[in-house]
Amino acid sequence: MEVKLDQLLAVFAYNYMKQHQGDIIIDHRNIFKTLEKNGEIEVYLSKFHFDTENRFRFGDDEMPVEQARENARKQKWGEYIIKIKIDNHRLLLEIEMGRDDADTFPLDRMWMVDEITSYHCLSNFGKEITGTNYKEIF
């Protein structure tokens, strides 16, 4: 599972981000800890930064996860909001467009993901697409 997650994060860094890809490395260990503890984590992907829900707890470890996620959404932090889940050793994603300035999402590079349960993103052709089974678009 660690290899799949590392590959996913590498796709984000290489195929979407244009600058500050090191943000992923800073959050790497924390992503694994949160997935191990909660089974899921929400990440915020942009061309120029990457963060997780944990940043939006503002140092308050007792803050509920839902509140941290709401804080990030209010600030429109990610061009894409991606929920990463681990379920029965399967890597699952939910992809949501978080801002109007989002760029093409690398859906065609998600080969390491076992299932994308829902998506709302821009395709390689710049078309906005939404669905619940990403395999239907390939």
Image (cartoon, grey):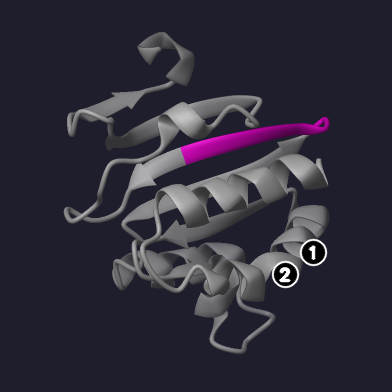
* Type of the residue with mark 2: Asn
- Residue at 70% x, 50% y is 6
Tell me the SS state at disc 2.
helix
Quarter of the picture containing the C terminus is top left
Quarter of the picture containing the N terminus is top right
Residue 104 falls left or right of residue 34: left
Image coordinates for residue 80, horizontal then vertical, percent? 37, 52
Q: Does 89 lie within the magenta span?
A: yes
Sort mark 1 into few (<14), some (14-19) or many (20+) by Cα contacts within 10 Å. few
Tell me the SS state at disc 1.
helix
Which residue corresponds to mark 1?
33
Image coordinates for residue 32, horizontal then vertical, percent? 77, 59
Query: What is the quadrant of residue 48 in the picture?
Result: bottom left
- Per the rendered image, the range of residues in magenta is 88-94
Q: Is residue 118 above or below residue 59?
A: above
- Residue at 53% x, 28% y is 116
